[in-house]
Image (cartoon, rainbow, N blue to C red):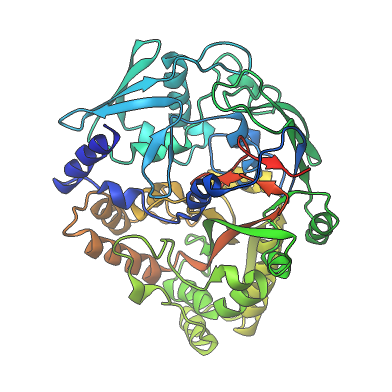
Amino acid sequence: MLNKARHKFATAAVTGIAVLSLALTGCQSAVQQEDSAATETATPVEGGTLAIAQSGDLQPANLLAGRAGNAAWASNVYETLTKYDADMQPQPLLATEWTVADDSMSIDITLRDDVTFHSGRTMTADDVKFSIEAAADPQNNSQVGFIARTFESIDVTSPTTLTINFSAPTPTVFDLFEYAYIVDPETFAGVADGSQLIGTGPFTFESWSPGSEAKLARYDDYWGEKPHLDGIEVAIISDSTAMLNAVRSDRTDIAMAMNPIDVQSLASNSAYNIVDTVSSAYPFGVNTTQAPFDKKEARQAVQYAIDRERIASQVFGDAARPVDLFWEPSAPGYPEDLAEWYSYDPEKAKQLLEEAGAVGASVEVTVIGLPSNTSLAEIVRNNLEEVGLKPTITVQDPTTWDQNQVAGELGQSFLPLHGTNGLGPATLLNVLPSLREGNPSKFWPEEYVELRDALTTATDDDYEDALHALSEYILEEAFTSVVVMVVGQMVESVDVHDASYTARGYLYAGTAFIDE
């Protein structure tokens, strides 16, 4: 039934709607890692606490958005309707089955009948409807909320069934299902401040000391396979040296969002496993309404000024690819000829700055306060100085950064971090803050909108041309361009077994255990 449902959407795509496979194609290493858990041969050990270290604090206010601060805990406390497998095909989780109408204008969903929230209340279709509507609410910052906002209606037909009616065939609905956590309406008001984080997952959220640590405990009434672990402890270690020391001293079992160079230093150590997860894009963007970047020549100049190869090797090591595009190379129609449009060319950068009358201009570069981003920013600062600009760096803590990014207010120029999360170009256009409407570059001309629409409505026959045209336009206009694409890597102790990662790179420890 499941493949049949997907085929119906694919058929709809061929008749003029965005192709399903294109919306769901991207980095697959995270879910491939999840599937590979089944190959573990160690005998499960009951009990113990999984110690996790991550560089950024938890961000419960952005639970419905894809934020790195939630990667260690959110998918252990909350669950989704479906989850992608290694082939990016949706598999049942809280939903047991689904059927797409013959005209692809609706989908009927059947839910499990044995799921309870951590409060003890049984999950129903009303809770699913509430959760999808919460994702659709712009105030909740869901990166795939735009999909839910296109729905005509959500009809609850029984405690375990509901129908979503589309305004047009919506092949990207499974991207929404992958991201939209099912939340408890009775306690949802307490999510933002972290006081009531009530899900249906294998672990309950016990406590959070902002900037310090969080603790989860096994949920004994979990509907699925009972967790082996007693609990999970997440330590917030923002200093990269302290993070590395925590790993080397065996004070943490899994290190998330480590400095990539530190990850590489551990790669040859037999005490650790390096696990690839999802890719992240590190772009450099500018505000096109502020001088000197109101002139295209100045925008192009700073892109030519950036030494992507140096950034890749010095900041990220083997995990990085110096490219200009936001799309995964595995995406159908990937425009390989455009991937290195902005090769390092400081002389050309100087020439373009002369043409723009921007030599000697002051440039404030705003950067999120994460180790890799600040290291990248230092190289960019040097690059801009070398071509005759006067750059300064402003570092914002992740929470402040998120608020400003959502508002589209990051200043004159900025160095964001975007997870591609297994999504294809047609979805990423509305997911990535640098590309979507309200972007901090203030860039939304009619031609850009038309090229975006051409891609999202493209058929198989014209999709590759549409993606190439849009990609070339983005590069030519230079309001934003990727500096490097980096594969996310987690460091795990060899004592950790059966930990896995979702398509968005979030840890799932429901089947994990630790050697005695």
Image quadrant containing the N terminus: top left
Taking the image as shown, residue 226 lies to the left or right of residue 163, namely right
Residue in the picture at 22% in, 34% down: 168
Where is residue 99 drawn, in percent x and y?
A: 26, 27
Q: Is residue 3 visible?
A: yes
Displayed quadrant of residue 214: top right
Taking the image as shown, residue 498 lies to the left or right of residue 9, namely right
Front-most of 343 and 156?
156
Where is residue 105 drawn, in percent x and y?
A: 21, 30
Image quadrant containing the C terminus: top right
| Above or below: residue 57 compared with residue 55 | above
Front-most of 101 and 339?
101
Where is residue 64 drawn, in percent x and y?
A: 53, 34
Determine the residue located farthest toward the bottom in the rendered image: 347
Taking the image as shown, residue 252 lies to the left or right of residue 282, namely right
Where is residue 494 drawn, in percent x and y?
A: 71, 54
Residue in the picture at 70% in, 58% down: 258
Q: Is residue 145 visible?
A: no
| Above or below: residue 298 compared with residue 240 | below
Displayed quadrant of residue 200: top right
